[in-house]
Amino acid sequence: MNLTNQKHLFDLPEDVTYLNIASLSPSFKSIEEAGLRAVKEKSKPYLIPSSDFFNPVTELKQLFAQLINVKDYNRIANIPSVSYGLATIAHNISLKENSEIVLIEEQFPSNYYVWEKLAKKHNAKLKIVQQEINGKLWNEAILNAINDNTGLIALGNIHWANGTIFDLKAIRKKTKQHNALLIVDGSQSVGALPFSVEEIQPDAMVCAGYKWLFGPYGCGYAYFGSYFDDGNPIEENWANRLGSENLTNLTNYESNYKALANRYSVGEHGSFIYIQMQIAAITQLLKWKASDLQEYCHKITASSVSQLKKAGCEIEEDTYRAKHLFGIKLPESINKSALKERLAHEKIFVSFRGDYIRISCHLYNTEAHFEKLTTCILSEIS
């Protein structure tokens, strides 16, 4: 199916060019409506049945499992943030002394600090794979960094600032050869770039919900593979215990957790408002294919990418980068302060991340938005 512009599903003003979903997504109108309905329900709590602590959560896990191609939704945990999910994962990993944790250069902080702490705990080492001049060489360097000393490698499906795609299938194959764990941060890819747990087989995957999954801020998801089946959560949430649906029996304390990843869900994960918003969001996402979204984004950005490269901007080659998120490295001669002022005046919203302008787009964007962006950048290149 070829996707067409879907701006009618959003409440975005005509004069706004929003190219910053990688920071925070706008809501579909259906998500806003679901949230408002849930807010009104909270005004009459006596009408909310106890089953609402559990049944909508199950529905949401089933939807997310479908989105990432997981057969058993019980391998999905509800988390409030990527850092919470990664902390849970690290809490259940034991490393050999002097083993190595492989990371990539300029990884997002939440996916660095937790591994730095784990390395200190087990007297292990961090091994940072430096960025190469292109995605092909960077992927080769990552594969070369994995050896018998590797305890785990943690990275995103793409680089969060410049969109470089990492070959997770090849990385997974190499980690299996050396009995190393693969931990994936899907925050900037799941929902926008094809991703299949069945295909990649990561040991764990975490994903923020407020970016490409269009959920509210403060929600996310984690997938836990078999390595973590008998692990320990970082908190003792009553709802994660076996038989917790029977509220009259809660003080007959239960020592057993629910099956698989259910033990890892955050306390109060049955949030009536957030859950309904997330269900509305993923229900819409499942109507689209991530591959079609990539095609749409490529179509509306191709001309601008070509023009900017000719003007001296550096952008990763199409083969090695995502189409929904990519970085534009500006020429040194450009006046960044003046460019930021011009973008603000034109109501163009992007992110400045390190040496890059990070561009992130979706089905509410058009080629005209990128023409406007390109005009602003070219006007400031001397």
Image: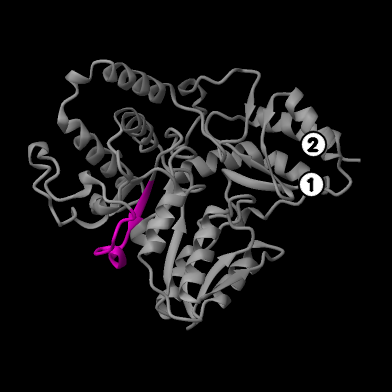
Rendering coords of residue 250 (x, y %): 12, 42
For label 2, the crowd category at 10 Å Cα-Cα, with few meaning under 14, some 14 to 19 and many 20 or more, is many
Q: Which mark is residue 160?
A: none
Q: Is 155 or 122 nearer to us in this picture? A: 122
Q: How many marks?
A: 2
Asked if residue 186 lies left or right of residue 204, the reply is right
Q: Is residue 170 visible?
A: no
Which residue is under mark 1? 330
Q: Residue at x 50, y 30 (%)?
A: 4
- Name the kind of residue labelled 2 in the image: Ile
Q: Is residue 230 rendered magenta in the image? A: yes
Give the magenta range.
Answer: 221-234
For label 1, the crowd category at 10 Å Cα-Cα, with few meaning under 14, some 14 to 19 and many 20 or more, is many
Asked if residue 207 lies left or right of residue 346, the reply is left
Q: Is 150 or 332 nearer to us in this picture? A: 150
Q: Quadrant of residue 139?
A: bottom right
Asked if residue 73 lies left or right of residue 197, the reply is left
The secondary element bearing badge 2 is classed as helix
Q: Is residue 70 above or below residue 61?
A: below
- Name the kind of residue labelled 1 in the image: Leu
Rendering coords of residue 46 (x, y %): 18, 19
Rendering coords of residue 79 (x, y %): 37, 46
Q: Which mark is residue 377?
A: 2
Q: Is residue 143 above or below residue 250?
A: below
The secondary element bearing badge 1 is classed as loop
Asked if residue 10 lies left or right of residue 278, the reply is right
Q: Is residue 364 above or below residue 192?
A: above
Q: Residue at x 25, y 53 (%)?
A: 263
Q: Is residue 112 above or below residue 30?
A: below
Callout 1–callout 2 Cβ contact below 8 Å: yes
Taking the view exactly as shown, the residue that stands out farthest to the front is 251
